[in-house]
Amino acid sequence: MRNYPATWYERVPAEVFACLLPGEIQLLLCPGVGLANGGARYHVPFEIVPPELRMPNTLLWVKLDENMNVVKVWKRELEE
């Protein structure tokens, strides 16, 4: 695995895509960048995303660990 600067993992833009699998929610990491501007899809355990942030199209910030696992999620405001 490549070693990227730690700051790259601290605040990654994301968006809620769907809740299609039991116990999981699908996020788009870096929407608008790559994969035909759709971002990278990640399946995240439900308990990581607070209930008030689980609606589709909710803008989020995501913190990743060194293995690219989502460890923290919080709300992203449009004006940021």
Image (cartoon, helix red, strand yellow):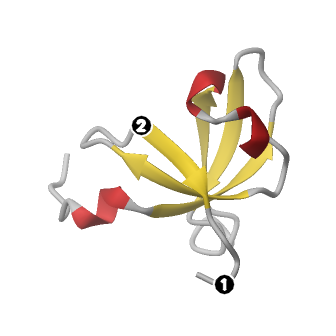
**Does residue 26 lie above or below 28 as drawn?**
above
Q: Quadrant of the C terminus?
A: bottom right
Neighbor class of circle 1 (other Cα within 10 Å; few <14, some 14-19, many 20+) is: few
Q: Are marks 2 and 1 in contact (CB under 8 Å)?
A: no
Q: Quadrant of the N terminus?
A: top left
Name the residue carrying label 2.
71
**Does residue 58 lie above or below 70 as drawn?**
below
Label total for image: 2
Q: Residue at x 36, y 43 (%)?
A: 68
Name the residue carrying label 1.
79
Q: Residue at x 58, y 74 (%)?
A: 33
* Residue 73 percent across, percent down from the top left: 53, 46
* Residue 54 percent across, percent down from the top left: 77, 40
Indicate left or right for 67 with 41 as reference: left
Indicate left or right for 44 with 8 as reference: right
Of 55 and 20, the residue lying toward us? 55
Amino acid type, label 1:
Glu
Residue 57, picture quadrant: bottom right
SS state under label 1 = loop
Q: What mark, if any, has residue 29 been given in the picture? A: none
Residue 11, picture quadrant: bottom left
SS state under label 2 = strand
* Residue 61 percent across, percent down from the top left: 54, 58
Mark 2 or mark 1: which is in front?
1
Q: Residue at x 20, y 59 (%)?
A: 6
Of 42 and 64, the residue lying toward us? 64
| N-term-proximal mark, 2 vs 1 | 2
* Residue 60 percent across, percent down from the top left: 62, 57
Amino acid type, label 2:
Val
**Does residue 48 lie above or below 80 as drawn?**
above
